[in-house]
Image (tube, rainbow, N blue to C red):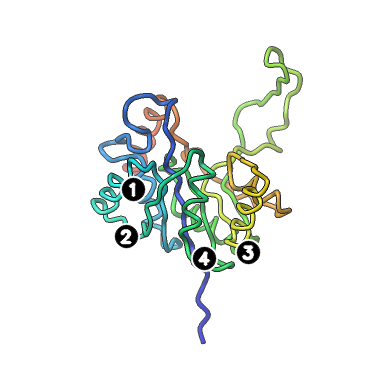
């Protein structure tokens, strides 16, 4: 009997309020060259052969809008649109609870407002996760990084070679992520990313080199930068 390979499922938390970007429209639904940012994001996974299924978490008031976008843009891999929570971790937990996962399946978590993750990097991340159990995309800082404890003067220059700026997707063996979320809930522990939750179980996270294009759109300046990146990607045939 042929053994079925582990499924690869992506959870996209997109329930944030986007207060730093301002305006009446939540940032994940803001247009980027005529198409909502979250759609650009989901299309990267739609076009990736390594991905089997996607679940997206949005505010309850946006469920109908998101379902309409899934239909309009033919996002066939989006199997679930779920209600997000107050925090990113709550949104991921809500989506995770709806998925029928085997322990060996791979779960990726990716920010809804990171529309520039290349499919080749998704594939590389999945392969590293299959081998090592956990893997995240990250890039090293280009600038000198200095530390300030009080916020008024510097007290230490940090070694850039030892520093990484963590991105998403972050990929985990399903059993690791499920156990990590159970422990976090029990301990009432919140983190800004899943890697920190999985590390609390004693697992080491594999670093996979990301791209400086893989920005998280947070401020109005990011919209301007994203427009330039999208134009360059279009000229190179990447989208």
Q: Is residue 64 left or right of residue 106?
A: left
Q: Is residue 50 left or right of residue 177?
A: left
The residue carrying mark 3 is 131
Mark nearer the N terminus (1 vs 3): 3
Mark nearer the N terminus (3 vs 2): 2
Mark nearer the N terminus (3 vs 4): 4
Return the x and y of residue 39 as percentages of the image width and height: 33, 46
Q: Secondary structure at mark 4?
A: loop
Return the x and y of residue 60 as percentages of the image width and height: 37, 43
Question: Mark 2 against mark 4, which lies toward the viewer?
Answer: 4
Q: Is residue 47 left or right of residue 4?
A: left
Q: Are marks 4 and 1 in contact (CB under 8 Å)?
A: no
The residue carrying mark 4 is 101
Between the C-alphas of marks 3 and 2, the distance is 28 Å
Which of the pair 219/95 is nearer the observer?
A: 95
Instruction: Classify 2 as above or below 43.
Output: below
Between the C-alphas of marks 1 and 2, the distance is 17 Å
How many neighbours does mark 4 have within 10 angstroms: few (below 14), some (14-19), or many (20 or more)? some
The residue carrying mark 2 is 76
Between the C-alphas of marks 2 and 4, the distance is 19 Å
Mark nearer the N terminus (2 vs 4): 2
The residue carrying mark 1 is 239
Question: Mark 3 against mark 2, which lies toward the viewer?
Answer: 2
Q: Are marks 3 and 4 in contact (CB under 8 Å)?
A: no
């Amino acid at each position: 009997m042929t053994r079925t390979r582990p499924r690869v499922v992506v959870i996209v938390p997109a329930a944030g309020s986007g207060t730093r970007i301002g305006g009446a429209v939540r940032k994940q639904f803001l247009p980027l060259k005529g198409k909502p940012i979250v759609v650009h994001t989901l299309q990267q996974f739609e076009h990736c052969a390594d991905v089997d299924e996607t679940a997206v978490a949005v505010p309850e008031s946006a469920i109908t809008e998101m379902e309409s976008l899934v239909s309009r843009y033919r996002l066939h891999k989006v199997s679930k649109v779920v209600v997000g929570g107050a925090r990113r971790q709550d949104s991921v937990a809500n989506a995770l609870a709806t998925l029928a996962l085997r322990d060996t399946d791979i779960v990726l978590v990716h920010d809804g407002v990171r529309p520039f993750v290349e499919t080749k990097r998704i594939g590389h991340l999945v392969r590293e996760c299959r081998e090592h159990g956990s893997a995240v995309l990250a890039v090293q800082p280009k600038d000198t990084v200095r530390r300030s404890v009080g916020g008024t003067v510097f007290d230490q220059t940090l070694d850039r070679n030892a520093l990484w700026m963590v991105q998403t997707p972050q990929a985990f063996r399903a059993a690791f992520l499920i156990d990590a979320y159970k422990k976090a809930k029990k301990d009432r522990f919140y983190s800004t990313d899943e890697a920190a939750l999985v590390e609390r179980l004693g697992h080491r996270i594999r670093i996979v080199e990301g791209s400086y294009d893989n920005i998280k759109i947070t401020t109005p300046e990011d919209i301007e930068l994203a427009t330039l990146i999208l134009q360059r990607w279009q000229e190179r045939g990447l989208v």
